[in-house]
Amino acid sequence: MMRKIISAVALTALVFSTVSCSDNDNDNGLDRTKERTWNVQLLNHVYDTRNDDSATAASASINDQKIVYRFSTDMLKLSFNPTIETTLGGIPQQFSWTGVNASNSEEKANIYSFATDAPVSGLSNFTGQIDLIDQNIYWSYTATSPQKIVYRVISTLPTISTSTSTVTTSVWSDTTATHQLPMSSFAINPSKMTATFTISQYTDVKIPRTYMSIVAGNATLAITPKGYRITGTGLAAVGTYVTSASTKYQTAKITIDNLDATIDLENNSIHATFNMLGAKVTVSGTISI
């Protein structure tokens, strides 16, 4: 589920600070024998479980989060103490406790997973993953507000990206191309209810041996119980073309029409369609958050 995100955005602040750390740190500057603090801003997707109306049931906000963690001697486990901030029913809430245990596997040695019931009043079903190498984090939980309303909360980085398992299909009037190389990402801005859409390493079969990175801003964001719906037409985009033979870079103005993307945070899936460069493009597959 967790893979390296495409890019950081301005809303994301990932800062590693050291607690009692020596000067001879190893492993890319991380001394895994010492206790450390990770401060991060996460986007909290909050869903009121009483209400099935997506227009009123869900909201989003960006809040500061903190974890203090320490590795086991064999590096297969880490123990961390989270401090979670979120807003439930318009009221800021904070949950803090100690002793969450996470473990990894040989296949994904840098990713630590956890699932536990938090020993604090009002919070349960605390699950997620922490990637300390790629500086990525995801967790979800059930929280009860002071008004005794139960909410489902999913916390991610503000940039949500698709993984390499995504399939992108482009259909022109005279040809169809299907490829798995392109990566799509959405930088979410809940305060403005907009999203920036990026698709990288896209291949236009009309221009041989060329791929491009395309960025379009100001798509309309709607929050749904399971994630987001992102729409827009006439979106002004900038495309950067790269010719593989000569590595020449060239930028061009591109318009994206009829963008309709659904992001499902619960099931880690994406489906998007849009028109671009004379083709109808479909993106579907899994996402990393």
Image: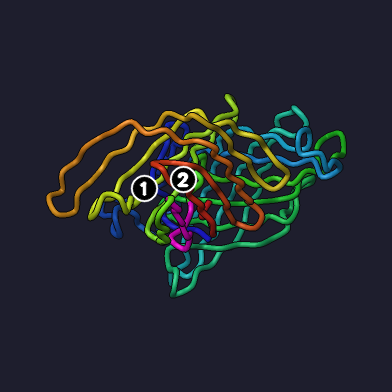
Q: Is residue 176 above or below residue 229?
A: below
SS state under label 1? strand
> Quick one: label 2, few (<14), some, or many (20+) residues within 10 Å?
many
Q: At 43% from the left edge and 72% from the top edge, which residue is drawn?
A: 74
Disc 2 designates what residue?
Answer: 185
Tag count: 2
Q: Is residue 194 magenta?
A: no
Residue kind at label 2, given as amino acid type: Ser
In the rendered image, residue 86, in percent from the top left (x then y), is placed at 66, 36
- Quadrant in which residue 31 is drawn: bottom left
Model colouring: rainbow
Instruction: For mark 2, give the secondary structure.
Output: strand
Q: Residues within 10 Å of mark 1 (few under 14, many from 20)?
A: some
Asked whether 189 or 38 is in front, the reply is 189
At 57% from the left and 24% from the top, the residue drawn is 192
Give, as a single range, the part of the protein colored magenta.
Answer: 162-172
Measuring from the top left, give residue 17's x and y in whole percent: 40, 42
Q: Residue at x 19, y 40 (%)?
A: 249
- Image-based side of 257 in relation to 88, left or right: left
Outermost bottom residue: 106
Whichever of labels 1 and 2 marks the residue nearer the N terminus, that label is: 2
Q: CA distance from mark 1 to mark 2?
A: 9 Å
Q: Is residue 18 left or right of residue 72?
A: left
Residue furthest to the front in view is: 174
Q: Is residue 165 magenta?
A: yes
**Where does label 1 land, which residue?**
200
In the image, 259: left or right of 241?
right
